[in-house]
Amino acid sequence: MLSIPMPDVTSDVVSASPATLQWVGMEQIAVPISMTLQDDALQQLSAKANVFVSLEKPEAKGIHMSRLHLALNKLAERECNQSSIDELLEEMVRSQEGISKNAKIELSFDLLLKKPALLSGEFGFQSYPVVLRAERHGTELNCEMEIVIPYSSTCPCSAALARQLYANAINQQFPDSTVEKVELMEWIQSQAGSVATPHSQRSYAYIKMALGTNEWPHLPSLVVELEQLIGTPVQTAVKRSDEQEFARLNAENLMFCEDAAKRVKLGLEGMKSVTDYWLKIQHRESLHAHDAVVVDQKFR
């Protein structure tokens, strides 16, 4: 029985509209990746990948997309780091048999970290959206990382107005020039003592870091550093002692979105591996129906 070879349009057909194309590829491919995270242990993560190569040969009908997918599958068998990503990009170019010179990849995943409570010893798990990007132009590699850090912010203006209301209420409740300490403490802890609450909100720092060929930062350490810069990261599992401590920390860490942005900016300026950055600070207001936002970057 005569065997008829399957057609290969990509290789055998010449394009009717000859032209080069900057990027051709696929988006949202599911792939498991493994990274060294907490306790220096490998952790498997579920990622979505966008992969592209350049089309340098004008007469080529298209690229070999299935070869990109097969090359990407090998990432599931390796630790995902700068070296393995560089090797993958090189393999992607090589798979196209001379019609491509450049390659790029974008990996999106949620970084899941174990987070201890402030005081009680309890713990929970917190996820952080991360995007890793890498481009290989010829032999030159450039990498970029994005991460989102959630935190709590309490408005300094609102706190000052609340303190004024407390002062007015104490003046009305205790009109004499002296106040019995026990009586004052009982009043403060009563329902009547809940005079005003400063408005707080869940807030977010969206950060993009250009790394060039520098070594990638260790992700759990990066999260800890950024959270320490801001001062009041969101919590996971808590008991009352943790919640009270969180309230105390917020009172000590009053900030506008500008304050948070300046802390993050100065922190990024001090990171040797970061060659450029972009940041957006978003305070999702509880007072307003709109958000307070700061956007800044290193190079204009």
Image (cartoon, rainbow, N blue to C red):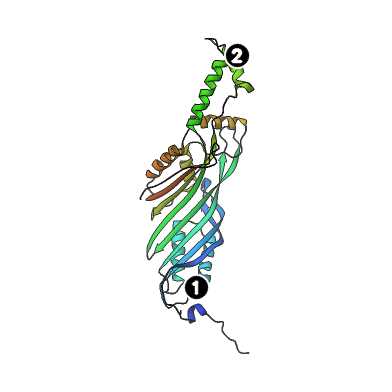
Mark 2 lies on a secondary structure that is helix
Write down the quadrant of residue 58 in the picture: bottom left
For label 1, the SS is: loop
Res. 253 in view: no
Residue type beneath disc 2: Glu
Q: Position of residue 59 (x, y in %)?
A: 42, 78
Give the label on residue 183, or none.
Answer: 2
- The extreme bottom residue here reads 1
- What kind of residue is marked 1? His
- x and y percentages locating residue 38 in the rendered image: 53, 46
Give how far apart the Cα atoms at labels 2 and 1 are. 80 Å
- In the displayed orientation, state which residue is furthest to the left: 299
* Residue occupying image coordinates x 60% and y 30%: 241
In front: 93, or 293? Answer: 293
Residue 28, position as x, y percentages in the image: 55, 61
Which quadrant of the structure image shows residue 46? bottom right
Badge number at residue 64? 1
Where does the image place residue 161, in percent across and percent down from the top left? Answer: 50, 27
Q: Nearer the viewer, mark 2 or mark 1?
A: 2
Quarter placement of the N terminus: bottom right
